[in-house]
Image: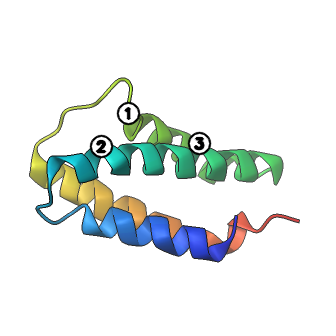
Amino acid sequence: MPKFVIYCVAAALFLGAFPLPYGYYGLLRVIGCAAFSWCAYILFESKNTKHAWIMVVLAVLFNPFAKFHFPKEAWAVIDICASGFLLFIKNKLKQD
């Protein structure tokens, strides 16, 4: 996964912790689900299953179809933690 994509998704997730228009959060669900699914695939291919399963959980959490409803404060924490985890694991997401 290109590092530029990782940084863009991490920035979008971090911005999700702030009060923004509702449409942004719908877009964030689509972007987050796609990015975390892609990350999970890369990590499963590289036999890094522990981190891959965390990405699967995040992809399910951010999926735009079966929405999880949490208070705004909880989503802010989830967004920041997901952003931090994505930045933490960025070196393991290199594709050969």
> Which numbered tag is attached to residue 92?
none
Q: Position of residue 28 (x, y in %)?
A: 35, 51
Question: Seen in the image, is 90 located left or right of residue 81?
Answer: right
Residue picked out by circle 3: 53
Residue picked out by circle 2: 26
- Verify CB contact (< 8 Å) between mark 2 and mark 3: no
Name the N-terminal-most of marks 2 and 3. Answer: 2
Its colouring scheme is: rainbow
Residue picked out by circle 1: 64
Whether residue 54 is visible here, answered yes or no, is: yes
The secondary structure type at the circle numbered 3 is: helix
Q: Relative to residue 25, is residue 83 depicted above or below?
A: below
C-alpha separation, residue under disc 1 versus residue under disc 2? 7 Å
Question: Seen in the image, is 53 located left or right of residue 64?
Answer: right
Name the N-terminal-most of marks 3 and 1. Answer: 3
C-alpha separation, residue under disc 2 versus residue under disc 3? 23 Å
- Verify CB contact (< 8 Å) between mark 1 and mark 2: yes
The residue under label 1 is which amino acid type? Pro
